Amino acid sequence: MGTLVLGGGAIATVSAVSEANNSDEAVVTRVIDGDTIDVRMYGDVHRVRLLNIDSPEDNAATGVAECMGPEATAALAKLLPEGSAVTLRYDSERYDRYDRLLAGIFVDGVLINAEIAREGLAVPLVVGSNTRFIGDVESAVTEAMTNQAGIFGTSLPCTLGSAVASYRTQADAAVASTVPSDSASIANVIGATTVALAAADVANATIDAIEWVTPDLRKPYKTQINDLRGEVAKAKTDQEASYASAVAAEKAEADRLAAEEAARAAAEKAAADQAAREAAERQSRNSGSSGGGGGSSGDGGGSTYTGCRNYNGYGMIDTKGRHFEPIPCP
């Protein structure tokens, strides 16, 4: 005898499957999720776990669903609508620890276990020593990966394909960024590239969160993420080199301008000093000169000339120290 867990936790006892046959005919009564169905067989309802596949959880009772869980349930319901006639084919172990029948489900000779995997909604799984259908499932999963179907595509943000596509967009933008010429702008570009590097860790975490997909199947997608991260890291190295060059060029230009300013200031000072010396020399010459009937210096050391004079001239200096030149009186 086997047992069946019904809704609400009730347990029903069902008739044992004929152990003499390696297959049985049944009718689908309900699809539970992407890898579990109920069938009617020999007058009783049996819960069947599809052999050699594992699909995402779609727990309507708790409201918790893994990425593509509802999609897997819907896909299996489409492949196995209620009332479908199916053939169950068994392997060495017929029941799992939950007393569910373990079987390959066939419709008109087509292995449904492989078909749901071909849609990218299930991955290979070995339960006990049952490996009868594993090869067919593995081939179907390889096809799904090639076709980017289901979890391997981009139909939902949580898929493996979406994680890679999203990071590829960030990485391509970082790698293709035009490097400005000034150091401040380059620093901004480097900041954006640094963010893109950190986003690789987020993308890898998204991939690791898809736990129903086996690590070996997740690995190629993580490899793509890490390869893209390497391109971003190289771009950042190049950007940092450009930044260093820009800083050096800006410093050299600042030094050149400072040197030019210092030279200009020195030239202006030299010219001012020269002008001051020449003015002092002229004053010294004029202090000892006399003309136009003028006499020697009187009070205050200036000229004692008392005639008419032009104070715009520079020939003589009066007793008050003012420059003038003698002129004829009218």
Image (cartoon, rainbow, N blue to C red):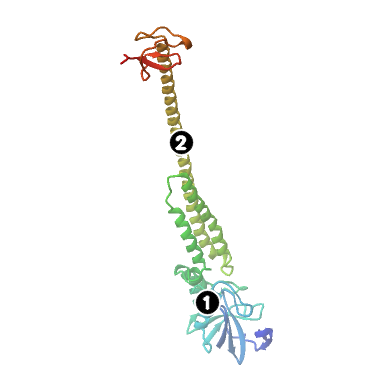
Vertical position of residue 50 compared to residue 199: above or below: below
Instruction: Place residue 33 in its image quadrant.
Output: bottom right
Locate residue 234, reporting x and y percent. 48, 49
Horizontally, residue 280 falls left or right of residue 52, namely left
SS at mark 1 in the image: helix
The amino acid type found where label 2 is placed reads Ala
Vertical position of residue 203 compared to residue 289: above or below: below
Residue at the spot 47% in from the left edge and 63% down from the top edge: 165
Counting the numbered discs, the total is 2
Query: Looking at this view, is 94 or 5 the one in front?
Result: 5
Task: Give the residue at mark 2.
Answer: 254
Q: Quadrant of the N terminus?
A: bottom right
Residue at the spot 61% in from the left edge and 86% down from the top edge: 46
Locate residue 89, reporting x and y percent. 55, 82
Locate residue 26, reporting x and y percent. 56, 88
Residue lying farthest to the top in this orientation: 296
Q: Which numbered disc covers residue 71?
A: 1
Tags 1 and 2 in contact by the CB under 8 Å rule? no
The amino acid type found where label 1 is placed reads Glu
